[in-house]
Amino acid sequence: MFAFTVKWLGFLKVIPGLPLFFDALLKFSMFIIKPKMLEWLDEIESEVGSWEGVTLSLHKYGGVQFNYKGKEIGHLHGNGLLDVLFSRKMKAELLAEKRVQNHHVFKNSGWVSFYLKSDEDVQYALYLLKLSFLLQKNSLS
């Protein structure tokens, strides 16, 4: 069902501003149905934003994007969907642990998707982002 919805909603990305509006609606819906999600999103944004060299920006398809020296390491959507970029080798290792999934759109890439569902997931999301950050930092050194 979700994969169908993502493909069906693909048109959103071609209309300027619509992905950001849609993500705001996602966040508002979380405020109503799962208010704890907003705390998780804020915690992740605050922590990752405090890392040296990391900046935050709006992601072109909605949500907040985490960048290290101008390169994206991941992004977090308003519904708790975290997408993080790795090498394909690292992605395979993470998929083997069965905590992340193939990216919901770009399955044949280094992107993985992870859904926040509990307080414990916040720590794993931070782990994924820190791993991507460190890999990016080391590759640019």
Image: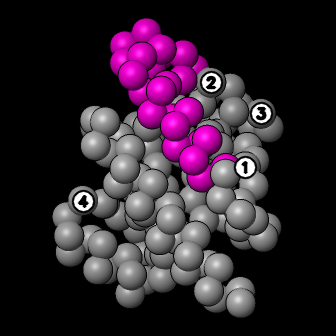
Give the alpha-carbon distance from disc 1 to disc 2, as whole Å: 16 Å
| Residue 41 visible in the shown view | yes
> Left or right: 120 with respect to 83?
left
Q: Nearer the viewer, mark 4 or mark 3?
A: 4
Q: Residue shown at 57%/47% (left/top)?
A: 47
Of the numbered discs 3 and 1, the one sitting upstream in the chain is 3
Type of amino acid at the residue the image marks with label 2: Ala
SS for callout 2: helix
> Left or right: 61 with respect to 104?
right
Of the numbered discs 1 and 2, the one sitting upstream in the chain is 2
SS for callout 1: strand
Give the alpha-carbon distance from disc 3 to disc 1, as whole Å: 18 Å
Q: Main secondary structure of the magenta part?
A: helix
| Cβ atoms at labels 2 and 4 below 8 Å apart | no
Quadrant hosting residue 64: top right
- Give the residue pinned by disc 4: 99
Of the numbered discs 4 and 1, the one sitting upstream in the chain is 1
Give the alpha-carbon distance from disc 4 to disc 1, as whole Å: 25 Å
Give the alpha-carbon distance from disc 4 to disc 3, as whole Å: 32 Å
Specify start and end residues of the magenta stretch as a single range. Answer: 25-49
Of the numbered discs 2 and 3, the one sitting upstream in the chain is 3
Residue 3: x and y in percent read: 35, 46
Q: Nearer the viewer, residue 89 or 47?
A: 47
| Cβ atoms at labels 3 and 1 below 8 Å apart | no
